[in-house]
Amino acid sequence: MRRSSCSSSTLFFAVTLLTLSVVVSSQLTANFYSTTCPNLLQIVRREVQRAIMTEMRMAASLLRLHFHDCFVNGCDASILLDGSDGEKFAAPNLNSARGFEVIDSIKSAVESQCSGVVSCADILALVARDSVLLSGGISWRVPLGRRDGLVANQTGANVALPAPFDALNTIIAKFAAVGLNSTDVVSLSGGHTIGQARCATFSNRLFNFSNGAPDSTLESSMLADLQNLCPQNSDGNKTTAFDRNSTDLFDNHYFQNLINNKGLLSSDQILYSSNESNSTTRSLVESYSTNQKLFFSDFANSMIKMGNISPLTGSSGEIRRNCRAINT
């Protein structure tokens, strides 16, 4: 009889947790601001377009902000908070994450029409979508209704964010920790079809990667170019495009590069060339390299999944007046 009671309790709690999960997810809806800020989508897209026209690279930077936000504390705009203990100063973001001033401008434009209504977390989600679309990629209906977090998590950012030097199994595990799978790993990595990386993120591959030799999975002409750009003992701050032959266009060329040993970061190339990829990611890289429509579809689905990582909704969190600081 006790065993039956225990089983019933376990089932009850499991159903309760599932119900709560569904409720949180269902609170995010694409038309969340249809009455409170009906022009929100147009305002955000206009401001993103202005930013990209000023600097095309900004599209990738804005997309990355949403990614780096959601992996730490969930999608709560905690990456935007200022302060020496903020996520901005975590190793994966320091001298790397950028676009904060663009978010400030967008928030200001939104506040001028809809004061105290739209969260910074939702702005990040919309900005990521528009950055992809305005770079030639796919669009999707962004679920909205997130609220902003009250604390940053620098320690979490140092631990949770995938690093360019991580092994594939480590990257897959970090994605799994936030509810994302191997398909999400590959499709979201495809965001590197736009943007640039600093020498510091890939110079480990250029000179002394293994037994004093460069990384053997790096194509020879690309290796020579990168060695010239990033000589040994340089400061590591020069940048180069992730996608050498399709720098600013959001397309599937990134995956063709991987098959040709032209992935820039180690964490890019291992999706195709590592032993672990045989059973996890290689086949999807091959599929995306020849089927852009499939990549776009999976990318949009993965972005929606990522945007649903532990959102604050209802009375949790707040709507920040300034994305850089909690309300006082």
Image (cartoon, helix red, strand yellow):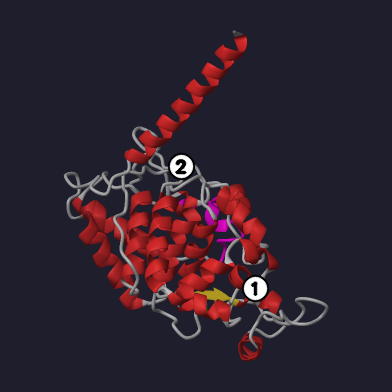
Question: Separation of disc 1 and disc 2 at Cα?
Answer: 33 Å
Q: Is residue 211 visible?
A: yes
Q: Quick check: 201 left or right of 313?
A: right
- Residue that badge 2 annotates: 310
For marks 1 and 2, the one nearer the N-term is 1
Q: Is residue 160 above or below residue 4?
A: below
What is the x, y in percent for residue 76?
A: 43, 46
Mark 1 lies on a secondary structure that is helix
Q: Is residue 75 left or right of residue 86?
A: left
Quarter in which the N terminus is drawn = top right
Image point 32% across, 49% down: which residue?
143
Return the residue nearer the eye: 204 or 303. Answer: 303
- The quarter of the rendered structure image containing the C terminus is top left
Discs 1/2, front: 1
What is the residue that sits farthest to the right in this orientation? 211
Q: Which residues are magenta?
A: 81-95
Query: Is residue 195 in sight in this rendering?
Result: no
- For image coordinates 51% across by 23% down, the residue present is 11
Along the line of sight, which residue is nearer the eye, 169 or 204?
A: 169
Instruction: Name the residue that disc number 1 marks.
Output: 273
Relative to 8, say whether 160 is above or below: below
Q: Main secondary structure of the magenta part?
A: loop
Q: Judge from the rendering whether residue 77 lies leftward or rightward of residue 257; answer left or right.
A: left
- Circles 1 and 2 in contact, beta carbons < 8 Å: no
